[in-house]
Structures are given as C-alpha cells and as structure tokens.
Image (cartoon, rainbow, N blue to C red):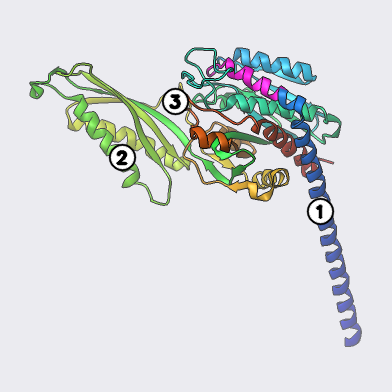
C-alpha cells in the first residue's frame, strides 16, 4: 500500500473515532440534562405537595404529639407505636420491633436497589423550660435535640413516597431507630440485620444556628468519633487540718485533669483535631474533710481510629501515673459495655454530591452550604461504616424569633425550632431517595 493510502486510512479512522467520541459525549450530556430536568420537576412537585395546608398541618400535629410525650433511649415504646399507627394509615408495611423499639418501613417495588432514610426517636433526660401549648408533658424528659422533627420529616417523606410508589424504580427503607443519644442505637439496628441489603443511606439533623431553607454538609469526615471515661481516684481520707496524715485524692485528680489537657496541646499534631474534656468531678461533701475517693470523668473525640486508640491508652496511663505520684490508686473505665464508642461520621463523596445536587435543585445553590467539621458525635456514623452514606444539617432557625429571643442550642432546656423546616425536610428525604434510583437502577 502506498504512503498516501496509508495516511488517508489513518485520518479516516481518526475522524470516525472523533465523531464517535463526540456522539458519546453529546449523548451523555443530553442524558445529564434530562436527569437534571426530571430532578427539578420532581423536587418542586414534592416540596409543593409537602407545603399544602392539609399536609403541613398533619406534619405539625405529628411533631407536636411526639414532642409532648418524649421517651429516653430504648424506652421509645409509645413513640414507636405512634409511628406504626401512622404507617398503617398510609398503607406502608414495616418490620417491628428491631433493636427493642425500632422499626423499618418499606415503600416501593421491593427490588434492588434499596435506599435508606433514617430518623432517631429518643429524647433527653432534662426538664423543658419552653412555655408553649405543646411542651413536654413528661417531667424530666424533653425533645431538646430535634428528634421529634426528624421522625416527623421521615413520616412526611413516607407519605410523599407512598403516594408515588408506582414511580419508584427501587425500594426505600424507612429506618426509625432508638437510642441515638449516647447509646449507639444505630449499631444495634445493624447487628439485628435491619439494613441488610441497603446500598446507601441518607440522614439529616436540624440545626438551630442555620436559617430555615438552608442545608449544609461536606464530603469525607463530617463529625467526630466519641468515647467516654470514668475514673475513681482512691486515697486515704482524714481531717483537712492534718493533710499529712491523708493521701489526698482531690489533689491527685486535680493534677490528672491538668495533665490530660496536654494530650491535645502537646501530644497531638496541630493539624489533627482531637478533644479531651473532663466534664464532672464528684468527691467530698464537707469543707473540713479530705474524702477517701473522688470520681471524675468526661469524653474524648477523634477523627481517626488511630486517634481513638492513642487517646484511650494515654488517658488511662495519665490517670494511673498521677495516682501513683500522689500515693493513691486509680481505676479507669471506658464504659464500652454500656455506651459503645461512636466512630467518626464520614460522608461518601459520591453520595454527598448526589444529595448536594438534589438540595441545590430544591432550595437553590446559594442555600446549600459547605459545612465545617464538627467535633460533636452522631451514631449515623455506624451506617457510614457499612454503606455509602450522606449526612446533612438542615436549618431550623426562624430569623425573626431568633432576633427577638436569641438562638438556643441543641440540648438546651429552651431549645425550639421553626416548624417550616418540616415540609422541606420531608421533600428533601423523598427527593434524595427517588432521584438516587435514576442513576442506580439495575437493569
């Protein structure tokens, strides 16, 4: 073959390859444009439905009913029954009980992919000081972390999804879990198989410092892991006027508390986030008596499992060494049999991007914020260890009310939230699930 013919064939092949590549790219671009258009129509329809007066009033009734009757970790029997009753009215099947008081509802075809939406049910052991017509009716218990709103938004999503069940290209699992507040309810849901087969999961938490209509998150680590410790410093008590005849446990605890602060300031890379906080000290009840023992404890936070192991080891060493220096003895308990340590919450980058895009369509790009990492902990982290997960903050601050009374943080006896967040959260839950199937449906 002559050189001219060879060159001609080469250029023809390159041209055909270029045309095919261009066609492939254009097909992908057209598909992406259609998906965005469908997602926009879907999210607008879902939000409009959730904001209808009858639907919104239903959401508020649910949230207020749950708020009036708060229940603590693994005691959410009435709350669970209330959720089951609502699911029955919606015609949604569920499995119950799971992890003592939890339940999992199912909406859709029953076929893969399975997508999870999660809400937690438990309240806090504190007295509500908000004066409202639907304040807590249970003395010493309060929904001060917004879990009543989380359950309400998930029930709202259940209704939206059930009304569109024929359009679902997969199956949505509605995960109502117990015991997020310190007792790792999510880990028990996983152990009992409640999420077997679930490919990805989405969750939200109301945030009083974020205005209603705003959501926020970030890819990768979003919240810290957490552990707790309790120590007993054993000394020798006696009269405070003769301290030389005692082995003062208060002095030993004081030095241990100071030494523990150096775990972050002098033993941790400044570019790695860790926290060690002593949160209580309990010892002695007379002004002229050195006690026999002092009990103290607190929490430690970390963003890596290496960080957890290091802090746990050093907390024990420091307390025991300070006890020895002051001629006392110490026992350190990390309470893992009672309160399981939480791993860090890590957003899967792909799931984060998916939820972010849905949020941008639903609320506008300017209303989806890039969050900073929080050293707070959340047992959604257990789900993020098992499957693709995305966890977002959702604003629940009424600017007018906040300007008048100030913002009250989570876990405050004065905590309140703007109920306008309820239809937004319900629609976001449903939209994230439904649009997930568009790109993950199995053929």
Q: Label 3 belongs to which residue?
A: 336
Q: What stretch is highlighted in magenta?
A: 58-73
Closer to us: 295 or 148: 148
Marks 2 and 3: which is nearer the front?
2
Whether residues under marks 3 and 1 lie with C-beta atoms below 8 angstroms apart, the answer is no
Image quarter (top left, top right, bottom left or bottom right) of the N terminus: bottom right
Q: Residues within 10 Å of mark 3 (few under 14, many from 20)?
A: few
Whether residues under marks 2 and 1 lie with C-beta atoms below 8 angstroms apart, the answer is no
Q: Distance between the residues labelled 2 and 1?
A: 54 Å
The answer to whether residue 14 is visible is yes
Q: Is residue 264 magenta?
A: no
Across and down, in percent, residue 439 comes to 78, 45
Whether residues under marks 2 and 3 lie with C-beta atoms below 8 angstroms apart, the answer is no
Closer to us: 196 or 277: 277
Q: Is residue 61 magenta?
A: yes
Tell me the residue at 67%/15% (across/down). 82
Closer to us: 60 or 132: 132
Q: Label 2 belongs to which residue?
A: 261
Under circle 3, the secondary element is: loop
On residue 269, the disc is none
Above/below status of 76 relative to 399: above
Q: Label 1 belongs to which residue?
A: 33
Q: Earlier in the sequence, mark 2 or mark 1?
A: 1
């Amino acid at each position: 073959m002559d050189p001219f013919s060879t060159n001609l064939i080469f250029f023809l092949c390159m041209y055909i390859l270029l045309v095919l590549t261009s066609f492939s790219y254009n097909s992908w671009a057209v598909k992406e444009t259609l998906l965005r258009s469908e997602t926009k129509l879907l999210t607008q329809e879902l939000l409009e439905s959730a904001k209808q007066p009858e639907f919104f009033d239903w959401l508020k009734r649910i949230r207020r009913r749950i708020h009036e009757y708060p229940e603590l970790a693994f005691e959410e029997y009435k709350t669970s029954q209330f959720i089951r009753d609502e699911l029955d009215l919606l015609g949604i099947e569920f499995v119950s009980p799971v992890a003592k008081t939890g339940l999992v509802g199912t909406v859709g075809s029953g076929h893969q992919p399975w997508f999870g939406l999660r809400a937690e049910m438990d309240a806090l052991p504190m007295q509500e000081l908000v004066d409202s017509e639907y304040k807590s009716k249970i003395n010493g218990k309060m929904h001060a972390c917004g879990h009543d709103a989380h359950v309400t938004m998930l029930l709202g999503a259940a209704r939206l999804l059930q009304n569109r069940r024929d359009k679902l290209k997969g199956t949505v699992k509605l995960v109502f879990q117990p015991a997020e507040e310190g007792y790792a309810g999510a880990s028990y849901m996983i152990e009992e198989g409640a999420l077997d087969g679930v490919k990805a999961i989405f969750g939200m938490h109301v945030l009083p410092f974020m205005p209603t209509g705003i959501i926020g998150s970030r890819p990768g680590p979003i919240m810290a892991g957490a552990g707790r410790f309790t120590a007993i410093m054993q000394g020798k008590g006696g009269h405070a006027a003769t301290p030389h005849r005692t082995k003062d446990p208060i002095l030993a605890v004081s030095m241990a508390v100071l030494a523990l602060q150096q775990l972050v300031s002098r033993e941790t890379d400044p570019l790695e986030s860790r926290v060690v906080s002593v949160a209580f000290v309990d010892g002695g009840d007379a002004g002229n008596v050195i006690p026999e023992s002092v009990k103290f404890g607190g929490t430690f936070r970390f963003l890596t499992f290496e960080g957890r192991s290091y802090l746990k080891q050093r907390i024990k060493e420091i307390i025991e060494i300070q006890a020895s220096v002051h001629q006392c003895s110490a026992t350190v308990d990390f309470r893992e049999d009672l309160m399981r340590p939480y791993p860090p919450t890590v957003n899967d980058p792909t799931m984060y991007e998916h939820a972010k895009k849905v949020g941008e369509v639903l609320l506008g790009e300017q209303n989806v914020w890039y969050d900073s990492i929080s050293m707070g902990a959340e047992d959604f982290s257990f789900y993020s260890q098992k499957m693709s997960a995305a966890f977002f903050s959702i604003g629940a601050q009424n600017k007018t009310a906040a300007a008048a009374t100030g913002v009250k943080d989570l876990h405050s006896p004065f905590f309140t939230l703007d109920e306008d967040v309820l239809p937004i959260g319900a629609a976001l839950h449903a939209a994230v699930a439904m649009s997930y199937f568009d790109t993950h449906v199995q053929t």
